[in-house]
Amino acid sequence: MTETQETRIGDVVELTVDKVANGGFCIARHNGQVVFLRHGIPGEVVRAEITDISKKFLRADVVEVVTASEHRTPAPCSYAGTCGGCDWQHVSLSHQRELKSEVVREQLAHLGGITHVNGKPLAEFAVVALSPQETGLRWRTRNRYSRIGGVSVGLKMTRSHTVIEIEDCLIAVEGSVALAQAKVHLGTGDISTAQSSSGQHVVVDQRGGPWLDETVGDRSWRIHAGSFWQVHKDAPEVFVQTVRRFANLKAGDKALDLYAGAGLFAASLGADVRESGEVVAVESVIDSMRDARRSCSDLPQLDLITADVRKWITQIAEDFEVVILDPPRAGAGLEVITEIDRITKRAVVYVACEPSALGRDAKYLADAGWTMTQLVGLDAFPMTGHVECIALFERF
């Protein structure tokens, strides 16, 4: 196709892949327009099919690699490139982390104005694996599948309602698809499965059950199978260790855990402040807070509150040494950050599953006088474009 021809959906064009973008895509350009490209690697020359056209950009999928990156590797899954569950199966695991590091650095610099972290230039920041044993496969303990005609299950294509029938999912824990398939004739709607650290593997029912027993460190939780829990099998332990290290709480301290879920962080922090201290945990999902109350009833220093964080935080007049913040993907937002600034004495520990949200909220914190002094990036979602960051903000 010549440059004078109008670009149409279905056209196949040759592109040079420029850089990685947030969301599992790469950036290229065609006739001056930005192209959000799937299945490429920066530095490659590829042929790609145009899949979507807007006034500001194009979307495209690689159909042929002309000049391959040294980091390109055969995808372990036969559905890679068709199913929408993974973004980076064609990239070596170590280079996936390099790409995610670049995304985090770009989002923090562009949106947050961050130039240094951990006492070093932001350019030296790197995402790391959750454990030395990470293979990138069989890590996902919570999974959701679409029914296909009441006889099979599948996963949706990217940016589509079209479902691809599958026999297995290699990032899901062993047996997840088979478990869903065994229940496909029962009920309607999607089928969700959950596996606990104790080995229970169940289909989530309409009430969010049955019960699962989760263990992190020396503490156990009894939670609904449908309650929020970190999906990577190694994530709860690593996240708790990092949050406790950043919070650095002592006996008698007072801490606030916002968007507390089932109390994963609150219970661990409660052990640090001991009975002479206090941890206030706020969560809007009733079942999650019930799980927290059930699992943490032996910790009188925990004050567990079911409430909307945005509404609740404007009504309190007490101060806290440290605030733990683990908001939804959209982030906390200016209103919540403003209130956190008002009530926090020493530190904010921010757990972020979306780099752009962390960047925006980091700017709000910086404007209020807080500095990001520590940051870890954890590859809690291998083979996908997602990454988890835990940041420490201190007031100077």
Image (cartoon, rainbow, N blue to C red):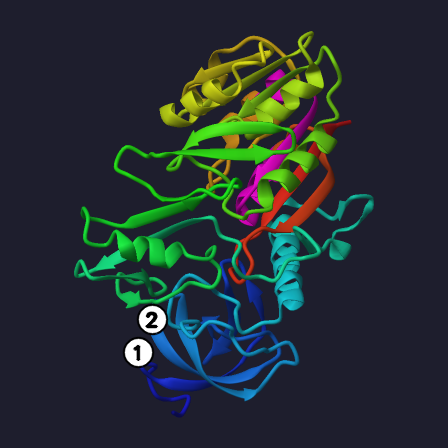
Does the magenta portion include 104? no
Q: Which residue is mark 1?
A: 9
Q: Position of residue 166 (x, y in %)?
A: 33, 67
- The amino acid sitting under disc 1 is Ile
Q: CA distance from mark 1 to mark 2?
A: 6 Å
Does the magenta portion include 352? yes
Residue 322 in view in this figure: no
Would residue 29 be found to the left or right of residue 307 on screen?
right
153 w.r.t. 243: above or below: below
42 w.r.t. 235: above or below: below
At 65% from the left and 50% from the top, the residue drawn is: 130
Q: Which element is circle 1 on?
A: loop
In this view, the residue farthest toward the bottom is: 2
- The amino acid sitting under disc 2 is Asp
Would residue 250 be found to the left or right of residue 148 on screen?
right
Quadrant location of the C terminus in the rendered image: top right
Which mark is on residue 52?
2
Q: Are marks 1 and 2 in contact (CB under 8 Å)?
A: yes
- Picture quarter containing residue 326? top right
At 67% from the left and 39% from the top, the residue drawn is: 391
At 58% from the left and 39% from the top, the residue drawn is: 236
Mark closest to the chain's N terminus, 1 or 2: 1
Quadrant location of the N terminus in the rendered image: bottom left
What is the magenta range?
Answer: 340-364
Q: Using a 10 Å C-alpha cutoff, classify the residue at mark 1 as few (fewer than 14 neighbours), some (14 to 19) or many (20 or more).
A: few
Q: Which element is circle 2 on?
A: strand
At 42% from the left and 88% from the top, the residue drawn is: 3
Q: Position of residue 207 (x, y in %)?
A: 28, 32
